[in-house]
Image: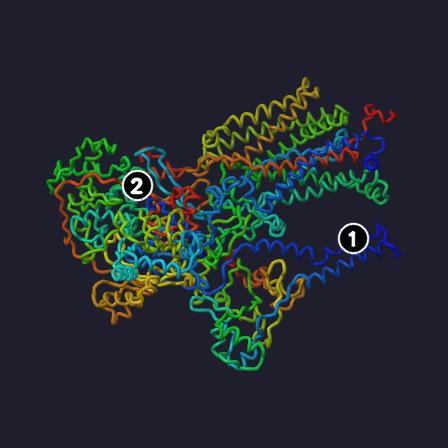
Amino acid sequence: MKVSRRDLLLGTAGAAAGIVFTPVPWKLLGDVSIWTQNWPWIPQPAHGPVETKQSVCTLCAAGCGMRVRMAAGWPVAISGVSTNPITKGALCPLGFAAHQLNWHPRRLREVRHHGRAASWEEAQAAFERACAEGPVAVVDGRPGRSASGVLAAFAEKHNGAYRVVLGAESQALLPYAEWSGTPVSALGYDLEHARTVVSFGAPLLDGWGTPGRFTRLWSEKAAGASNPELRLIQIESELSHTAARAWRWLQIRKGSDSDLAAGVARVLIEERLVAARGPLPAVSLADACSQTGVSELAIRELARVMATQRPTLVIAAESNASVAALNVLLGSVGAPGGIIRKSRAKEGPVPFEANPNSYRAILIDSTVPWDFVPRTKAEIFRFAAWDGGGLEADWLLPCPGFLEETTDVPSAPTLGVEPYAIATNLTAPAETIKTAAQFLAKIDSTLPEIEKLIQARCSEIFEGRTGTVYGDQQTPVAKFESAQKLEEQLRGGAVWVNDAPKNGELRCAFREWPGETASSAVTDWASTWAPAVFPPLAAKLYQESKLREAPGRRPA
Amino acid sequence: MNARYGMVIDLDKCTGCGACIVACATENNVPPAAARATWRTGITPMLVQKLTNGKEGGERREAFIPIACMQCEHETPCVSVCPQQAVELDQKTGIVMQMPQRCLGCRYCMTACPYHARYFNWWDPQWPPGMEKSLNPGVSVRMRGVVEKCNLCHARYHVAVEKAAAKDKKEIDIADYVPACVEACATGAILFGNLADERDPVFAAAHSPDSFRLLERIGTEPKVHYKTKQDWIRVMADRNADRPTEAQHG
Amino acid sequence: MRRPSVVFAVGFAVAMFVGWVAFPRALYISQEQPLDFFHKTHAEKSGLNGCDSCHMAGSDGQYSGIPKTEVCAGCHTEKLGSSQDEALLVDNYVKQAKQTPWLVYSRQPANVWFSHAVHTRRAGLNCTECHGNYGESDSLRVYEQNRITGYSRDIWGHSISRLRRAPHDGMKMTDCENCHRRHHIQVGCLGCHQ
Amino acid sequence: MAEMAVLDRRWIARGAERSSTLHFLLWLAPWMFLLLLGVYAAGLCFYYGLNQTNMDNRFAFGMWIFLDLAIIAMGAGAFFTGFLVYILKQYDLKPVLNSAVVVGLTCYSGAVAVLMVDVGQPLRAWFTFWYPNTHSMLTEVTFCISCYLLVLVLEYIPVVLRNRQLRKIPSFLVFEHQFHKLVPVLAGVGAFLSFFHQGSLGGLYGVLRGRPFAYRQGFAIWPSTFFLFILSAMAVGPSFLMLVVAAAEKVTGRQLVHESVFRKLGFISGALLAVYVVAKAVDTYIWLNVTSPAVGFSPRDFYSYWPLSSLFLFIATVPLGLLPAVLMIWRRTALKRGWLLVAAALACGGVLLNRFVLTVQTLALPTLSFDEFLSYSPSWQEVATFGGVIAYGVIVYSLSYRYLPLFEPLKGVDKNVPLD
């Protein structure tokens, strides 16, 4: 029998009618929608046990305590440590997404020589050659670490120079160091006892120093009160986040901080608001007004406020002698609620010089901020975990990223106390990655080992018998039965804080009023952020919201 | 015992640092910004916005207001409009729950929400290669074409529930349940707790005279409260605030 | 009977066959487990009693799932028999300290939050009430995966129509809902989803 | 070409005068292009997602929703004419019934198509039927639209079956004959369904208590916009139908219906429009003086943003509401085809504007005191997708006109029909 067109139609009709009574259309409909809920190109979290580890953030010098949630062996979330006596559980916005940095597209994974891939052997050979030919400089961004010890030791043994790069916050303390002959690393601010804080452009509420230290103080003593216990006066050209939330904001012309300081000093002395009788600044009050664009009335008002609710602590954004001099006038140096000496250290490391052409080569540690670029002919060996782009380094050497290296964390620049913590590595870096210390140790096997140095430091603290260890509970060092126990605790994320130092050990004196200091105001809201790149999620702050300006230099 | 989880946010204490935004994003596997994303197409279940007193120069004042889902208790705008029950007000916790896997992406709920607290996934979520290892296993990743919002860090609630169950307890310990934004706030501006419990500090804070809610007169009974002692902030944030004279020179 | 009706009936019958017989076979891929495993033998020989001697929930309620290779290594440091799977286990996984890539029959999708602690400790359910008496099995059955959704077949259940199913056949949302309804448990979406 | 023309000719009703095949194809060509472009744009949205549009989190609804509301109001002619003819026995409107059905069908199916592009996860859209939220206006819309679409298809079938070739199949003829008895019932059902979802479309925005600009009080569960939408749709439906038929006459160059039909449509449209304008005015008054002040919003909050100022409100009510109403009722103008069409156009414009204000302005206005007034302009993909829908409408109507008896031959006008 032959099949006609009509038969085909009928058959199809039958099939169509039949299929409705089978699972086919219904199951397919369901499964296709389930497919849209599990699209294969959408990543899903891995399965695995979830545990929480405690460590210390090493992205900048602040050394905030952090709790890291690990899933299937990888860090998936970061939070502050409320038991940490300094940060009290706070972190900066960038810190919360820092665990994603290790997968940042700009992560450095292989040695680069003039932008081309190279090997560690070549880099090592080149550096050895340099050492042989002439003096080398080893530049460190965070002195006082065990790693710093290794770098310094190498420089010493190979008649090179160990130099440090100071951040804006440390530089702000330079004048006091100069006047008192105390190393910058031994100086700090006693914010906790200040009752008036006058900030010349320092972003006190926005990532300055150790986040959480001042912000907590401010939220407890100042926020929203019309006559607060802690008066925050922000002197700045723009309405920064700090200026916005300060008790008073005084708008001045950009870079006229020194003039305002001089003006205030004049009023303080002339109106006998302070004990000191001089030296008088060269700048007249009228000049100060015209320079700063602030009315004479406002300056007098400011001076009076500074004098009334003491102790008054003046903080500069960077090195500014005339601003620093105000603290001397107000008697806030070496006094509670002022500039204090936090450690007994006699001399500190030498800052990197302006004209470094005397060096054959310069090795830059990964702790040095990316935008530090020595103007020199010397061959540059730069360690970094991420390539921030836009700068010339002969050798770019990949070093461990976030939580990939065990290192210790000494006191941060602005702190008034002396803590010590150990950041243990929670994940292992790729084999192709080395720290500067490891690199140098390869060249000179006689260098001290970091692990040993950390041990030494721990037993030093143990012998010192002063201070307290803040872990899950607080334990005075005196209570520990062995250095090992103490080291264990520190390696577990606890932090040691030395007892508050006796004040009055600090004396500052200068003969005439310091002159104008050229201002290079740091205005980037994340300028304290050391790594070359931002965590991708940081874009929520400026791209996916209007909360902040997009940062100029760093690619997210 | 049904709980009513909510917040009281102290606007005087918010420094606008944005830690809550980032902490929220990591906790809830919110993807990084797509190349073309803007403040109008991005995903920020917790978002800090600026308040100004409208003046310029030295007279200008600024404050910051964190906005997440208000967890409306009454006439919840998004719940009633969703055609296929992808949103619901949970009886046990008072959390307004958004189920992206049920959502068809009609965005009706977004037009219904007066707080603009809902976000649409305009792009497929993408992370740089390898970064998917940093995803939180407690939260499933959303796909393109669905609406999402703050679920009050529900993954953390799950952990608390499981912990309670392990101890064979019926109720969770509120200390085990702290949303990421609350935990992240450096100034402790966000107070979180059970509004249905008189002994909870959040209860007193929510009922203090200087606390208020956004668009209160619409009658959606948000469970996110705000408080400030500064009149100009109150006037800027609260549409229904009776405008005191000193508000003009805030 | 008239020819048209016959033709129609034929078409209908073909559709029926395709829908009920061919389609279910085509929808699932079969995968062999990396190793065979004998729950029964382990229960008897190693004197382990109860599922929770291997699949336990920690103090914080976290469920351990399938034991890690380290646990197996407790006994299987050396080959305990001549079977091929035994050799595979020791050589490929124990010796190399690698995790066995088990295919989990009851694996729920990423958007599901299921707490064993809540169901066993809090609600006092027995494992068998959802998993069947798996402990008695003396080999691992073939793992079937849905081609479209990627789910294990156990989620939908082995009866394609889901009518007249054996008990514990199927772990779909409706199955959870039914059980919750039976026990008057009220949970919102995010009570079980994440 | 030649044999194609012959084939083409065979499908055209005997005796009906139609343009040459070539001419017809030339007419279709640009519309086909527009349609394909629309399909391509929609494809982009399916493949890459809705980032292809200019919508965003604040403008979650855009041009698509606005125009969907609009064309569905225009398509209301279908249910309303059916209602008039079969339920109210206004048989003199029968001549335009078929084209009313075609217009309705294209408008509704087009709207549904665009909605499928508009949702982020079309493959899950059926969840609405499986897990419906009975409180949601959108659920009501979905159910009504899909059911009514089915009704329109059923209403369209008999028209299709009267095609010259299809008539030859005896069973079809029988079916068509039997089916015809069902049509009045369908008209009834259709009227009911359409009535409801025109309303629920209005309710869509009226229930948004979070958007004081759109929120309205109402009766029972329905806000006042529910009823206003029904009224406005019924008012503008016939107007749009007039415009379509008039356009068809212009394009084909022959008179298709008696002048009386136009006048009747015009009168109905005008009368309803007049009622609507009054109702709308009352509603606006209550809303501005009672509803929105109660939630702390004053007219200033709504109308102080140029260009969406009170001017819009005026335009929508007077020149695009009252005026056409008068023109279509007042004998001096109502008897003149030209005036009638102008009025119809104005009326359609008015409803268009009304839908625009409700959808777009609602989202543009700030709700929080620190929000800003936002603007939005559609991307080319959005425009093209919608252009495709319009093209689709024109094509379906043209094909129907060519091959199906959309209009009964006019006695005394069409020479091919002997006067008996």
The residues bearing labels 1 and 2 have C-alpha atoms spaced at a distance of 77 Å
Q: For label 1, count other residues whose C-alpha is less than 10 Å away and answer few (under 14), some (14-19) or many (20+).
A: some
The residue to which callout 1 is attached is A12
Q: Quadrant of the N terminus of chain A?
A: bottom right
Q: Position of residue A521 (x, y in %)?
A: 29, 41
Chain letter of the residue beneath label 1 in the structure image: A
Q: Position of residue A457 (x, y in %)?
A: 25, 65
Q: Nearer the viewer, residue A205 or A109?
A: A109
Which image quarter: residue A255? top left
Which image quarter: residue A321? top left
Tag 2 secondary structure: helix
User: Image height check: is B134 above or below B221?
Assistant: below
Q: Position of residue A347 (x, y in %)?
A: 19, 56
Residue at the image point whose x is 20% and y is 65% from the top: A464
Residue at the image point whose x is 73% and y is 32% from the top: D26
The kind of residue on which mark 1 rests is Thr
